[in-house]
Image (cartoon, rainbow, N blue to C red):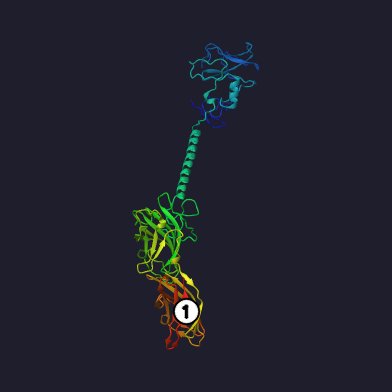
Amino acid sequence: MAQNPPRLCPKCGTPAEPNQRFCSECGTTLNVASNQPTAMASGEQSVIPSQGAQFATQPEPGGGVPGNTGTAPTQMVGASGQTPGAYPATAASASGAQFYSQTTDANPIPPPPPPDSLVGSLYQSTYQAPTKTPSSPSQATQAPGAYTVPDYARAPRRSRLGLIVSLVLLLVLVLGGVAAYALFFNKSNNTQGGTNPQHTATTSANSSTVTATTGTGNSASTPGSSSTTPTTTASTTPNGATTEQVNLAFAYSGINLTITSVQYASSFPDDSSLSAGGVRIAFNENNAATSNPNFLYSDVARLILPDHSSVAPTNELHGISPASQITEPNWLDFAVTSQPADLSQLTLQMGTAQENQMQISLKPGADLAKYQPKTVTPGTSFQYAGLNWTLVSATESLSVPVRQATTGNVFITVALKVFNPTGNAYSALASDYVRLQAGGTSNAPTSETNFPITVDSQATISGTMIFLAPQGTTSFTLVMLGSSNPPVKQVTAPFTIQ
């Protein structure tokens, strides 16, 4: 005998058992004849109660057992106890069992709604709650009036495992985000609040930490900054480094130097030569001259400690003086094993033993006036060799382009303007006809003099003559030497530099 193909729910397509009347997924009626009254066996009568009458199912002895044809039929008894009129049944035979079917115009009794729905809850509150269907005939017969909903007709129970897993994942994401934010915020505060050991100058190789004076915390300030306000006290950073911001400008060998900061630290990340602490002096250097003095900082720079001992540099960012027309940052590191109690008590010495040395106090706002040039403008006019001369200015300094004054001496730079009213050109070397008298000495111009040799007829020229003079002298005399061939009378032009 061939098997019938499985039925599918016309609404959701869920497979159903052969005797299943309702879809186990959506509750849709599967048997098209489910609205017809159930056929009864031979000799039984189907009794339909009148509309609105209360009824109950009364099983006869031996009833309720499937396949038992010898038992009395189940009758529908009205609430008054009288049996309503029965409709005749038509017998039919199928697979050795007799069934009866009969059409009727009575309203069919619909199946109960799923218990989990709103209608099901109202149904259960109106009628007696359904009881569990016995799994075998041996189990106790359900109580009269009770209605049992088959398992396949019940609405499927939805699992809450997915919801729980989703909530757990959401909680993990939230906690992870909070932890990441807290870690990043803490790291940012540490970076901003601490001292950056890197010197943020124009090159990535050099590094130095300096203390800013305008913001909160410790921030870096490059030696090349256009405006730097010096502090009056040093500050100690969380890593133990002590930094002092200064603004000290002076010139050495014609190189303009500006010290921007002084720092003590146990080590510097860009200098492995310091193993037990050291002092770093950061500065800017500028060479406005046409040539390079070519000095080594290891030869000319010394750090003077409070006990008057001197320390040579152990390392430099740039070990040699800058080339012509170059401006760049630089730093010098000195090995100092004991941290100075006060950085402002340190001194930078510039110059060799044969040069006029400068003692630069590393105290913020230190007075460096004695190392600054002094200039006067006499404006003295005189005639010499038929030419009209004017002593425009005279400047005293410790250095001139590419050279530092020798020990005990200073440079005197005289600026002159000459007009030749004659009809002939005048030609002569400045070293042949000019001298500077100061403190009992008379010196010819140095090699740094660039005064023109020739003054053409009706021409006006300007230039400078540079002389060495004893340091501390205030009265000077420019001497224009006389000669006999051609005959030229000696002329003098005194001036004073206080």
- Residue 341 seen: yes
Badge 1 marks a residue whose secondary structure is: strand
Question: How many numbered markers are drawn?
Answer: 1
- The amino acid at mark 1 is Ala
- Residue 33 seen: no
Position of residue 52 relative to residue 410, above or below, is above
Position of residue 162 relative to residue 464, above or below, is above
Q: Quadrant of residue 348?
A: bottom left
The percent position of residue 302, horizontal first and vertical second, equals 36, 62
Q: Is residue 409 left or right of residue 89?
A: left
Q: Residues within 10 Å of mark 1 (few under 14, many from 20)?
A: some
Position of residue 67 relative to residue 120, above or below, is above
The percent position of residue 116, horizontal first and vertical second, equals 56, 26
The answer to which of 213 and 484 lies nearer the viewer is 484
The answer to which of 468 and 88 lies nearer the viewer is 468
Q: Quadrant of residue 8?
A: top right
The answer to which of 473 and 457 lies nearer the viewer is 473
The residue identified by callout 1 is 493
Q: Quadrant of residue 373?
A: bottom left
The percent position of residue 251, horizontal first and vertical second, equals 43, 67
The answer to which of 35 and 493 lies nearer the viewer is 493
Position of residue 348 relative to residue 72, above or below, is below
The percent position of residue 405, horizontal first and vertical second, equals 39, 71
